Amino acid sequence: MASRIDDRGIEYRVRRVLLWQLSGSEAQAQRFHEEADALGFDLRRGPDPLPAGQREDLAPWASSRWRRGRLAEAPRRRPRARASGRPRSAGKWRDLVGLAARFGGSWSRPGRAIARQSRAGADALAHTLRLGGPPGRAKLLPMAQLTMPSLGADMESGVLVEWMVAPGDEVRRGQVVAVVETDKGAIDVEIFQDGVIEELLVEPDTEVPVGAPLARLRTSGDEAEASEPATSPERAEATPAASESTAAETSGPENGGAETAAHVPSEAAERAKVSPRARKLASELGVSLRGLAGTGPQGSITADDVQRAAKARPSAEPSSMRAAIGASMSRSKREIPHYYLRHTFDLEPALRWLEARNAEVSVSERVLPVALLVHAVARALREFPELCGWWRDEAFVPSPRIHVGLAVSLRDGGLVAPALHHADQGTLTELFAGIRDLTKRARANQLRSSEFSDAAITITSLGDQGVESLYGVIVPPQVAIVGFGSIVVRPWVVDGRIEARRVITMTLSADHRVSDGHRSGRFLRRVEQILQEPGA
Amino acid sequence: MSDTKTVILAIIDDVAPGCDLEGLDPAADLREELDIDSMDFLNVLIGIKERLQVEVAEQDYGEVRSLDGLVAYVDGRRSSGS
Amino acid sequence: MSRTTYREAVRAAIREAMQGDPRVFLMGEDVGAYGGCYAVSMGLLDEFGADRVRDTPLSESAFVGAGIGAAMGGQRPIVEIMTCNFSLLALDQIMNNAATIRHMSGGQLSIPVVIRMATGAGRQLAAQHSHSLEGWYAHIPGIKVLAPATLEDARGMLPTALEDPDPVLIFEHAGLYNLAGELADDAGAVPIDRAAVRRAGDRVTLVTYGGSLHKTLEAAERLAGEGVEAEVIDLRTLRPLDDATIMASVRKTHRAVIVDEGWRSGSLAAEIVARIMEQALYELDAPVARVCSAEVPIPYAKHLEHAALPQVEGIVAAVRAQLG
């Protein structure tokens, strides 16, 4: 799955390259097309970004949190000696970079490019030049900069490992001047301009965000090329892709915010007009402004709109709730090819640890076993991104965050499964406080709208008064649901002897379009493993 | 009705509003009778800690299954504490 | 209650003040024999004599300066300037003397002068007699600026202004002099330190003053017919502004439209919008709007003059735009 998205990301970047290419001459354009064809890329669809649906697919890929999760699996590769075969990014990609360099390097007539591009294209060009204004001003830049190149839409930063040049060194276009470590391995950073290194701005072993300056370069003349960033081609065609696909990241608080990358906002939503009072009221009432239709002047969202949204929030009224559950579950069973796994394991070590912990604290700081279970599942999910996300537009979108829906039964019947945000973060005590708060608000019908939409997987637990196991029905568009039966005492073999132990049965219902039983079985075992060492 | 019992019933009503406390059998298992889960029960115990200053230890949960048991436990702790 | 007009109410206020206090006298161009260019002082010369109803040469700087001097000397002069366009000839006296002397004398001298003038357009008097410059005067610290828009205020603001130890400017909209209505027989002094809510409503706040008040009230009536209850605030005092009344209303309605016959740029309307931003931004449900005069010298031709001024239709349209 990952490789598919990667291919798309590259395709996306190729179209971005077009923005550069179109600013050159007709002859260059022709050559570009020929070379792109030779490389097997279809450029005919023009420089537009991916269609909206596919753009969303790229967003989680670009998320740092998700990537960190992936990185945790494999140890970071340190740069090896230059002589030996250093890991490189995909050959296809390198070719593209080279291709872009040739055409991007001669970029010289921004005005013409603007005239020929859509407004979006012009914005992208302005962005590319990182001027924040019309690209035509590029010539005013007095000195070139070497910036941290983007080596993929998912790259947000890299670690500068080594400088290959020192201030005062004369450099030639194409010369390797630094080594940067990224999650694709160690990468040589080339300079795309002749000149003299004026100043190194970053010490080795520093993590530097994409686009941040690494060094200043004095160029040999004031020709048009001097106005370009020294790493221009790579930087240029990758930046708009990165900025666009990470839009979701910037729209919400990185940590713990109610808004998440789960919902890639449309451009219109990002620029939504919201009256100051509506914004204030929305924050007071916990109403998400995203997706709200405005009825005020110029389509702005007013306080009335917020109040309507607050009233229209899913209500705990049983009959309508029953209908909603029915519709959702029917859709799930109609559309999602479920498969089921079941695993019973010893919970005694975890419970003993928890009882010992609870004995030492006041009743108000006591933690219930459910927190241990949620904690273990959330942490295990970091290694199984295929279980945590959504099926949208005929494709799986992994969630960059582990927002876990917790099924909460309501007093008057029915249930809701609001999202516990960032369930894999924080301590057990914090997690349990979150669960208590969520349960309380769910039962008081005080949930926030984000909590209705953010969950990327659901956990349902029968508590201690239920039966041994349950098999959940996946909540669309999620792709998995974890079920915990009640904790029961059973004869269990421990160290070759039969003992009375408290055991629990965990089930997983998952979407066969996205995941398979083999890895999902490892997920159940991973949860068991985490629970054997609860204090860790 | 003892004061303790009144307060405990008020706490239960706060935690799980709408429960039929009138028809509650004081000797029966409180959680089965009221269909409240472990989270609610913990909230009741936290309420008792806050309003009656009595901590119910986890290993004593067996003594406080019923309303009567809970009242006796709390009264016992309060008299020995004061 | 008696039937009366705005003009008669102002005259009654002057008469009463002159009867009640021998220090009060009226001074200005044509206020005596001619009875005032808007006939406000008609009959006062006969009643009080030429010493207390004084015709002056056509020199605003001279007679306003004389008024300031008389006030400094212990009198209570009422100085009438024909229109506020002409008051610019006396601006030096008002701004550099009347407004400053209390401060420059360390509080030893005060200038209890009242300067009345006509303001505003609508009577086809063309660009040199029709402008609304009260917003300029409201810029000046050291003076108070009043804009009576009702019979009660026309009758009651003058006595309160005469009580004030500092200079007070009263802007009487020329279009209001013929305003007729019932006025209580015992109508008298009114406070000059607060705005008034002339009509209660909950959907939008219309802030206005002077000659625009009645257009605004008419617009509010029309809006009520559409189910939109607008609250109308009459500022009454343009300096100092009564922020509290404005903000209380905005907090209730969450929308505001300022109606001001002055020009939009650098106007009193601009000042009010700024204050709403400073004090009640988070109460707003729509951008505050303004209905002001077109930024041209007020035209003479009737249809052009009409088009240049805030009108009921424009106010209604601005409110509709607020509501989306």
Image (tube, coloured by chain):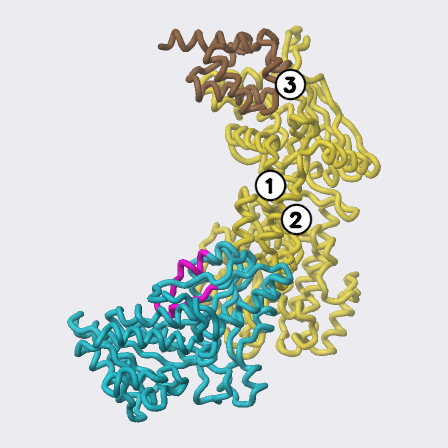
Chain colours: A yellow, B brown, C cyan
Query: In the figure, C61 relative to C99: above or below?
Result: below
- Tags 2 and 1 touching, CB below 8 Å: no
Q: Amino acid at mark 2?
A: His
- Residue beneath the point at 65% across and 52% down: A292
User: Is C316 one of the magenta-colored residues?
Assistant: no
Q: Which residue is mark 2?
A: A263
A418 and B34: which is toward the camera: B34
Query: The disc numbered 3 marks a residue on which chain?
Result: B
Q: Is residue A70 visible?
A: yes
Q: Secondary structure at mark 1?
A: loop
C49 and C303: which is toward the camera: C49
Name the side, left or right, on which A322 lies relative to B80: right
> Mark number for residue B35?
3
Q: CA distance from mark 2 to mark 1?
A: 15 Å
Q: Where does the C terminus of chain C fall, quadrant-wise?
A: bottom right
Query: The disc numbered 1 marks a residue on which chain?
Result: A
Q: Amino acid at mark 3?
A: Asp
- Say whether mark 1 and mark 2 are on the same chain: yes
Percent position (x, y) of residue A18?
70, 68
Residue C40 occupies which quadrant of the picture? bottom left
Q: Which residues are magenta?
A: C233-248
- Tags 3 and 1 touching, CB below 8 Å: no
Q: CA distance from mark 2 to mark 3?
A: 37 Å
Estimate how packed mark 2 is, as few (under 14), some (14 to 19) or many (20 or more) residues with alpha carbons within 10 Å: some
> Mark number for residue A448?
1
Q: Amino acid at mark 1?
A: Arg
- Residue beneath the point at 60% across and 38% down: A447
Estimate how packed mark 1 is, as few (under 14), some (14 to 19) or many (20 or more) residues with alpha carbons within 10 Å: many
- Residue beneath the point at 55% across and 36% down: A425
Q: CA distance from mark 3 to mark 1?
A: 26 Å
Q: Secondary structure at mark 2?
A: loop
